[in-house]
Amino acid sequence: MPAGQDEARQEEGLLHGAGRATTWRTGPYLETTAVRAAMRLADKERLLGFLYVGRPDPEGRRGPRPPYDPADHLSVLPYAVFGIPSGVLLDRMDLRRTMARIDYFRCAVMLAFALLVASTAGPVRSLDWTARIEALPTLVALAHGLRPGQLLETTTDLVGSPGYVYPAAEDPRDAERDYRALRAMEADGLYTR
């Protein structure tokens, strides 16, 4: 039935009070062409769900249910533990200063990543270059979106970067050594030769 959620919940409560059993169902199928046509919805109308009405089982039996797995609900734990208290704290802080601190933190995180730089333009010949980068001792992760045959422009800004590497080492000199090795490979046309 096309109705607002509040109205549907009110009807559900009235039906329960009258001794009826109800189930509210939603899902992505509500926006399919077939369902919209069957319900004769206008372009501006939106179906929020279906309210199924029936008689409750006099013996109170329930149908089979899938086993409960608490891991299915753990995704909300970080929000519940950190999100709500963080919001409460942020409401008590000067928003401009807080945003400036967050921006500085983001900058520090970005500096920990080494952006890939294409020093020469041309088509990406193959992805063999990934093995050369992955051989760097301090490499933790390599992320790129290149594919063979793709035309690569010379990197001039952050958006034009072919990807990034994430190095990590106990001794910063090791990470610096690998950073210089990466830049030397890139200067030699790493991605296009």
Image (cartoon, rainbow, N blue to C red):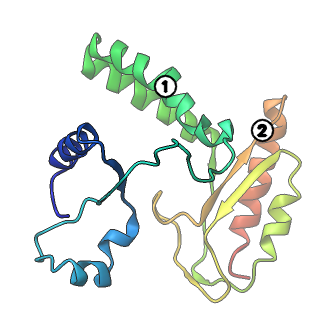
Looking at the figure, which quarter contains the N terminus?
A: bottom left
Residue 55 picture location, percent across and down: 36, 53
Vertical comparison of 152 with 145: above or below: below
As drawn, the label of residue 143 is none
Q: Nearer the viewer, residue 155 or 37?
A: 37
Residue 35 picture location, percent across and down: 29, 78
Check the image and name the residue furthest to the bottom: 149
Q: Residue 112 is drawn in which quadrant?
A: top right
Q: Residue 181 is drawn in which quadrant?
A: bottom right
Work out how far the residue at label 1 is from the one at label 2, CA to CA, in angstroms. 31 Å
Q: Nearer the viewer, residue 167 or 36?
A: 36
Disc 1 residue type (three-letter): Ala
Q: Residue at x 34, y 25 (%)?
A: 100
Vertical comparison of 153 with 49: above or below: below
Image check: 178 left or right of 63? right
User: Residue under circle 2?
Assistant: 168
